[in-house]
Each structure stands twice: as structure tokens, then as C-alpha cells.
Amino acid sequence: MEQRLANTWHMSINEKKFIETALLSDLRADGRCPFDYRKLTIKFGRKDGSTEVQLGQTHVMSFVTAQLVQPYRDRPNEGSLNIFTEFSPMADPSFEAGRPGESAIELGRIIDRGLRESRAVDTESLCVLAGKLVWSVRLDLHILDNGGNLLDAANVAALASLMTFRRPVCTLGGEDGQEVVVHPPEVQEPLPLIVHHLPIAVTFGFMTENILVVDPTYYEEAVMKGKLTATINASEDVCAIQKAGEIGVAPSVVMQCLRIAAAKAADMTSKIENAQMRKSACQERYASERNVMKTEEPSCRREVDATTEAKRLMKGPSCWDPFSRGVDSKHLKASLVSCGKLMEKRENEQIVKGKLMDSDSAEILEQRNPIAFATIATDVISNSREIKTLQDAVKPKSKRKKFSASKSSN
């Protein structure tokens, strides 16, 4: 308890007064209008059902999994949808590790209420064998960074994950037709969840009875005296309402919040659907490219393509090299041929020079080109005889001794 209170962040009086004074003038610290949302970014992971949402400085990650379990006794023909939240101390020092706090429990319940009571997800389609096996869908929400308004960001992440999740196909087999066979994705294409509509959560922060803002930030949450969350879909159907805080809200203000939430829900729904369409398009393009690569082309066509590619590579300087545009290809080929002949001649000379020590290399050269071997061998031997070194100019020691002895006798 002492550690949690020590990690709690407290705003100074001057910062609170600055935010309140700015809101009286319809201004916010980050430059937004009172009813504007921060920038929303939706990213999808490699696996189906994995989503990462960033709303301003708020960062939330979610992923969906499913497994076959026994259904509840009162609902033998329906699957289940369970939501779990994890508030990491990395996101906010006030979050405790290990067990969920009040804010984590509240967030999970609000999202669960919006999805369950509105029956956004068709749980009856999750039934495999009535009374024996159904799909249990698990939704995990991880808070990576607390920048304010965690509820709205987590709600968008949950909806995006549910829309992109795919479960394996199950069929009944066996002698009695009661054996469940789960087909892997390689055998049969997985099936998506049936989502009837998208309940969007829109949070309002009340600074006073008459001053309210949409999508409060981390600093504004420290100043506001209450909040109201309205979960509504694009068809303006109210799915759930949650009121928290000590301040009272008039019915006219509640109706105003619902009208604003309906407009925001339509905008959020279009963003989520557009992100899902982009992901689907990328997956289809990737799948088509893989299919094209897997299909085998005829051998004759491969030979023609190989010949064409070889001719293209032998046409001269590369077209992407800016320094080779002015080079004459014929002159370049001639110089390369001359360089090749010169290198071959030097190689043969090295082989002949090593004849006294290595006879195998000489035999190789003689087998390769007998005429060249004889010519080069003659040149090397004659050059070795004609060339004199400094050692040849020095007189032997025996002669020097005789000369010195004769001079001393005289």
C-alpha cells in the first residue's frame, strides 16, 4: 500500500488552474477542441487476432485466442467470450504487478458489458457439438502506455482483434458422428467470428457541471471530477452507459453526450473497417504472390528465360550505373579479352617457373597447350641464363685470399 501511494503522481495547483482556465476558453493543452479525438493508429500483427492501437500517447495491445471447452449448463448451444486485462507497471507506476486493480476490473467490465449485452458477437455460431463442445474465445488486453482514456483505446483494440480473428474449422466424424475433427489451416481455411455490429465506447470527462471534453488525456483525468462512457454503434443504438465520479449530470447533458457519441462511433467504425480492409488486401496480395512462386513453369520456358537473362546481362554496362553510360561496349569487351589473354600467359609462366619444384603443374600446362609450354619454357631458361645478379659480380673467397697472399710476399 505504501509503495502504491509513493508511485502515485500528483499534479501541482498551477497545472490544474492552467488546464481549467484553458477549458473555459474552449482550448486544451494539446491544441484540440473540446470534442476532438486524438490521432488513432491501428496496426495488425502477423497472427490473426493480434492488434496494436495507439490513441495519442495511450498504447494498448490485444490478441484473441480460442479453445474447445464444455459449454455452460444453462447455455448448452452457445460459446463464451471472456475478457482479461493486464495493467503493467511499465505503462504507469501506479499500476500494481501481479493482480488487477480497480481500474483494470472496471475497464474489463465496461468492455464486456458493451459486447455481451448488445450481443455484438454471435456466440451460437461457436457451438460445435451441442452440450459437449463449444469454442471459448479469450480476449487479452495489455496496457503498454497510459496516456489517458484507456477505455476507448482498449475498446477499439478489442473490436479490431475480434474482427480479424480466425478459428479452425471443425467437422463431425466417426462411426456415431460424435467425433470432432479440427482441421489445420493448411487443410481448410479458418473461419472468422460473426460480428453483427461494433459497439464503440466514447468517454467524456467533466471538469465542472457545464464543461466537458471528449477523450481526456492523462493530465485532464487528474483534474476532472467525473466521467461518462457511452457505448454506441454506428446505427445509433445505445449498448451501455457508465457514469463515474462525484459530480452530477443533468439529463439534457446526457442526451448531448449521446448525440456526440453517435457521430464519433460512426467515425471510429469507418476507421476500423478501413484498417481491416487494408489488412485483408495485403494478405490476399501476399497469398497470390506465394501461389505464383509455388507454381512450376515449363522447362522450355525456364530455359528461354535463362537465355534471355544471360543475354541481358551480357549487353554491356549496367543501366543503373551512372558512370558506365558513356563507356563503349565494344572497347570494353576487347580490353576484357586482352586482359584475359595476359592473365593466362602470366599463369603459364608461373607454372613453368615452378617446374623445377613441381612437376604436376608443368604436366598440366603441357597437356593444355604443348606449343605454349615449349615457347615459355625456352624463354624462361634463356632469361635465367642471361640475367646476372649482384652475387655474380663478387669474386669468390679463394681468389681474394690468393691475391692478398701474393701481395704480402712481394
Image: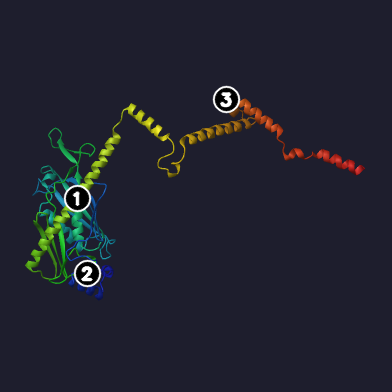
Could you tell me residue 148's position as x and y percent?
A: 22, 63
Q: Of the residues tagged 3 and 2, which is closer to the observer?
A: 3
The residue beneath circle 3 is 369
Circles 2, 1 touching at the beta carbon (< 8 Å): no
Residue 112 seen in this snapshot? no
Image quadrant holding the C terminus, namely top right
* Mark 3 / mark 2, whichever is N-terminal: 2
Quadrant showing the N terminus:
bottom left
Q: Which of the two residues, 99 or 150, is positioned nearer the viewer here?
A: 150
Residue 130 sits above or below residue 255 on the image: above
Amino acid carrying mark 1 in the image: Asn
Q: Is residue 282 left or right of residue 338?
A: left
Determine which of the numbered discs, if any, sits on residue 222 in the image: 2
Q: Secondary structure at mark 3?
A: loop
Q: Secondary structure at mark 2?
A: helix
The answer to which of 238 and 135 lies nearer the viewer is 238
